[in-house]
Image (spheres, grey):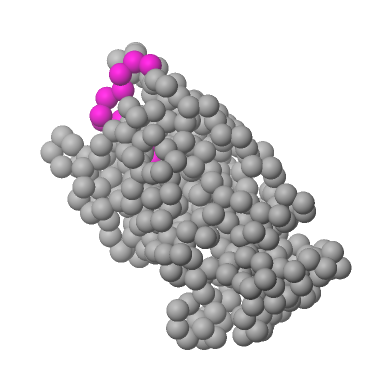
Amino acid sequence: MNKIRVLSVDDSALMRQLMTEIVNSHQDMEMVATAPDPLAARDLIKQWRPDVLTLDVEMPRMDGLDFLEKLMRLRPMPVVMVSSLTARGSEATLRALELGAVDFVTKPQSGLRDAMLAWSDAIAEKIRTASRARIALRPAPAAQITRTGPAIGAENIIAVGASTGGTEAIRHLLEPLPVNVPALLIAQHMPPGFTRSFAARLNKLCRISVKEAEQGEPVLPGHAYIAPGDRHLELARSGVSYQLALHQGPAVNRHRPSVDVLFESVARHAGRHALGVILTGMGHDGAAGLLAMRQAGAWTLAQSEASCVVYGMPREAVRLGAVDEVIDLQQISQRMLAKLSAVAASGI
């Protein structure tokens, strides 16, 4: 068995030691080299040709983001960022994902050694996923959609689920949308502290309003609601109107927020007035929920393998029979609005 070759770049000697311990404790991977900064890493990358690079965000001599941008332009490879749990750290991490990093791990704010070793399996799984990820040129932004066709009622809901690679996929999904789009509810696997920054970043880029979801708030057209990290997001009803419900129930498929939790609530409360979209990500979260949506009369879409960073969640949904249509990421926005407009025009 060929082991996954990992190279770690971090200015902290302790972090380099911990990452080495974590990687080498798993039989399917090995730490081939470590570097204290990007300049030292350049020669090591040429020498060892690693399968995955773990990269600190804040380092001396050259910032991790500057190095990542150059790396993805000159020698694209799977990168897992190592970020701090701070507002600045979350902003930098989102920028890294935009530049092409596959995923990220966060440094605990206290008890570094014990916490990192406790997360050993989760970190190893991120490295495995990164080693299998599709590293490609970033797609050009989709053209903005200026109209949705026939009026689409406020009863329509679009539910979206994603994991690894999803932050950029969601951006490409939302950026073209017009302001009269039906409300979107989004579950992206992401830890606390990052979802608010993610929503704020999208809100600056999109014509629609994008925000982190809040308990009990009304669901409005022209808005996208991002599930907060460590909270499940559900669609609920208040009389004839929709509202949002958040809770800290048990993790589902190892995730909170869980895509299945969101999709199943949309199936219950919106039924045939909903449209479900499952995007790039590892695992099977969302497949069963998307099937429930389809069985309730919703139209369901899955991102194509060719356009996914990781074709895991969409593959599982297709395998389960939960998907009406598989489509490239760049076409999803236009397709889902065309479908909703056709349904509105038919009066169904």
Outermost residue toward the left in this view: 239
Q: Tell me if residue 281 is in the magenta stretch.
A: no
Percent x, y of residue 15: 61, 80
- Judge whether 126 appears above or below 116 on screen: above
**Residue at position x 56%, y 63% in the image:** 104
- Judge whether 66 appears above or below 340 on screen: below
- Using the rendered image of the protein, determine whether residue 241 is visible from the camera's viewpoint: yes
In-front residue for pair 67/282: 67
Percent x, y of residue 290: 44, 42
Percent x, y of residue 41: 76, 69
Judge left or right: residue 41 versus residue 334.
Answer: right
Q: Which residues are magenta?
A: 149-159
Quadrant of the snapshot with the N terminus:
bottom right
- Using the rendered image of the protein, determine whether residue 313 is visible from the camera's viewpoint: no
- Judge whether 258 appears above or below 12 on screen: above
**Residue at position x 44%, y 41% in the image:** 205
**Residue at position x 54%, y 86% in the image:** 113
In-front residue for pair 167/241: 167
Judge left or right: residue 314 versus residue 217.
Answer: right
Percent x, y of residue 130: 66, 59
